[in-house]
Image: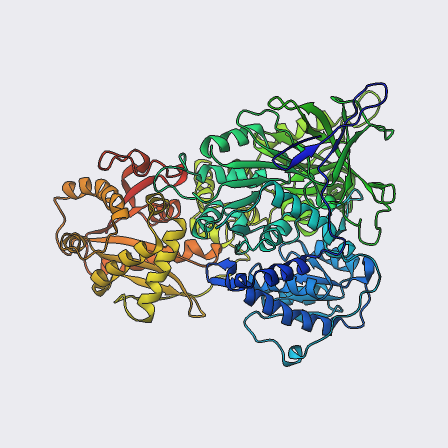
Amino acid sequence: MTERCGFAFQWAKTQAGFMWSVLHGPSFPLSADWTIEGALTQLLAANPARREAPALLTDEGSVSFQELSTRAHHLSRALRTRLRGTSSPLPQGTPLVGVCMSRGPALVELLLAVLQAGCAYLPLEPSHPRARLEHIIADAAPSLIVTGPEHEALVRQLASTSPCWVLDPRAPLEQEDAAPQAPEPPSSRSPAGERPFAVLYTSGSTGRPRGVCLPHRAAQNRFLWMWRAFPFTEGEVCCFKTPLGFVDSIWELFGALLQGVPVAVAPDGLERQPERLLAFAERHDVSRLIVVPSLLRLLVPHLPLRPDAAGAPLKKLRMWTCSGEALPPALAGTFLARRPGDVLLNLYGSTEVMGDVTAHVVRAGEDPIPIGRPISNTTLELLDDEGAPVSAGERGTLHVRGANLALGYLGHGRSSAAWAEGGQHYNTGDLCRMVRDPVDGDWTLLHEGRGDRQVKLFGNRFDLAELERTLLQCEGVMGAVALVHEDAAGPSLLGFVQPREPGAVELETLRAACTQALPPYAQPALYLIERFPLLPNGKLDRQRLLAFGVERAAPNEDPYTAAWRAVLPRAPMGEDVDFFQAGGTSLLAVDLLRRLREAGVMVSLERFYAAPTLGALRRGGSAGATSHGLILRGVETARGALGTAAVNLLADRFAEIDPLARVLGGTRADLHALFTSYLEACATEGLSFAATDERGDLVGCVVAADFSRVHTHAREGRFVLAPALGPLDAVMSALSDPWCHQESDPGTDEWVYVMLLAVAGQQREVARVTRELESAVLASARARGYRGVVTVNTHALTQQVCEELGYRTEARLDVREFVHEGTRPFAQVPEGGAELRLHVLRL
């Protein structure tokens, strides 16, 4: 047996000397009664001082271990009261609690309370189609569904007859919850470690989602292996950003908390916005991040080229864990070139095996990239179609034994074909090959596809039969085939439909059916075909069918679909798929509209943000979008409630998304001091505005002033500029000074300078609020007789809005080439945020 970095394995040989493809992970003892909630209790009992340490970090503040534990304890009492007398089909009669809540501290408190009450949780993702959620609720039959006020209407529509508890995190617990409730006695004498703690639904071989029952024992084994192989060090922070219904969320949250490591809890949807996700990780000093390769591909362009350079962001983020789908060698190579000192860990597994059963530390230049060697208490076998081990070097189907195995499927246990030998043996359906590692010479595994029709889309397992079943249920469909096309951009889901007769079914009908039945990541490109191509033996010619789809995908696409596919090559193509939920960002939105303009289709940024879907683009308007009223007020001072809120908004947003200040090492405090001085010097001119929504919440702010007076204030030293931000002032001057000389140094009351603009709130409203604030400045400047307005824009969204309002681009500057005092301070700015534009509008 060999052991390196927490990995250990051995191989078996026949008596004849042949080597079979069998690998064993290291053996470590497990506690039969270990539970997640018990481990946390033991951690805090062993180290009382840790109780006051932060457990959860958010942009609104932190929650200590003591606060988390106390709140969870009170909630568990309330849960026991509501669950008394209910029955459950789960092993050991464990009550099942549906959870439909937004990600935040309240969700974490509830999950711990569910476990402390001896229950298991059932994630109900609000973003999933209603039909999918209805199936999960009907199939799982939870004893209780807990939701927040924001999802109450949805839950009551989905499960009108099921008990529902609306948990408002801002409200105090009900009085009845204060009375202590003794825990109910266990329903069996089985070890506590075999009790399920979660039921996660995943696409099964039947074409319908099935619930996987995960026991505490599997979590213990997965955690202990990771803690041994890659132990936490002092000062580490993890990030909880994966939706609760996916198995990676378990490690993100509990794998850290049970070691006393704080967890930064990302807001919902942040995992689909690469810029904001990295900014969030930077703000909270995140040291480890789990990403599917689909997300890593979106993050890479925003990573600095030299992470060790002075002022470069994300210095604490040093471990990146890839799982959920195959890691392309080209993507790994690009990442390691940008982050050569970081650990890129490639894990393999599925929900049925607690997420991960193999691991490999990726090295630069590897092609193909192995999925690695088994984790602790795990045996991996490669078997042929008869169930016999294949010889080393031959391809076989991967089977898993050991402590990471789930309890089986809800309602079926381990009776399905995937489980064998009384549930002690799981057939993954993946094809692998055992090969020698070129560096250490030991055996490792390569993943080589699947033996069934399950695929990975955006890190999610999906069975092609589920798409086919959805299409076949549509009236007028005679046949349906689902395929996946793989290229450098990743997998694309394709659906081919043969109508019963010409005109019997329309693509719009098929798209609507897919939108209603399938999750966002599984929205396909659809094609109508007169008859399916066949091989000489009469079987379906899948290669010809796939080639047909690939050929049809590009030249014959309408401009909307073509632009969408070019900008988001791996995103779903449904008519009602939200651009931003599919992975779009503000930069990609600008790119999408540019491609549409080039195709002769003019779409404003405001219109697109109001309804960012393919269907709305085709309809030529924002039908179905909700527009809320805005109230614009002048900001006349940095003091007072409005001025204070405006400065905080500006500092928060620029600290979050501005790449220039970030690479300089400027802090939020530096930005806050600078922006306060801007407002104190300039707000009295009456050219600065704040926007509030109909609830009175501040959603945007613009700071503008007389151009000449701004220069006077700067010369007088009225602006508080931290030393770290010196190059920022210099690069702005480098862009605007030539224009000033061209305009013969504008005097007072000639030009308005828009200095700052920031918008918060929902993505759909960002463009509209930006436009309203810019328009307010223009209207004020016109009313006062100014010659025009000038501004320097660093973000693609404000650049686009300015151009739509009639600004002309007078100058451009790539900040990465800017030299200040003999250095290039902005060399590490990602390409997408490297261009400054000087915009001028003559009134």
**Percent of width and height locating residue 107:** 60, 62
In the image, residue 690 above or below residue 410: below
**Percent of width and height locating residue 593:** 45, 42
Q: Say whether residue 221 is left or right of residue 313.
A: right
Give the residue at x 53% y 41%.
319
Q: Pick the residue in front: 288 or 581.
A: 288
Q: Pick the residue in front: 830 or 30.
A: 30
The quadrant where residue 193 appears: bottom right
**Percent of width and height locating residue 145:** 70, 65
The quadrant where residue 659 appears: top left
Q: Tell me if residue 501 can be seen.
A: no
Give the residue at x 52% y 35%.
566
Tell which residue pokes out farthest to the bottom in this image.
Answer: 175
In the image, residue 383 above or below residue 803: above
Tell which residue pokes out farthest to the front in this image.
Answer: 46
- The mark total stands at 0
Q: Say whether residue 85 is left or right of residue 180.
A: right
Specify the quadrant that holds the N terminus: top right
Q: Say whether residue 375 is left or right of residue 409.
A: left
Q: How is the image coloured?
A: rainbow
**Percent of width and height locating residue 699:** 41, 62
Q: Tell me if residue 213 can be seen.
A: yes
Q: Pick the residue in front: 572 or 230.
A: 230
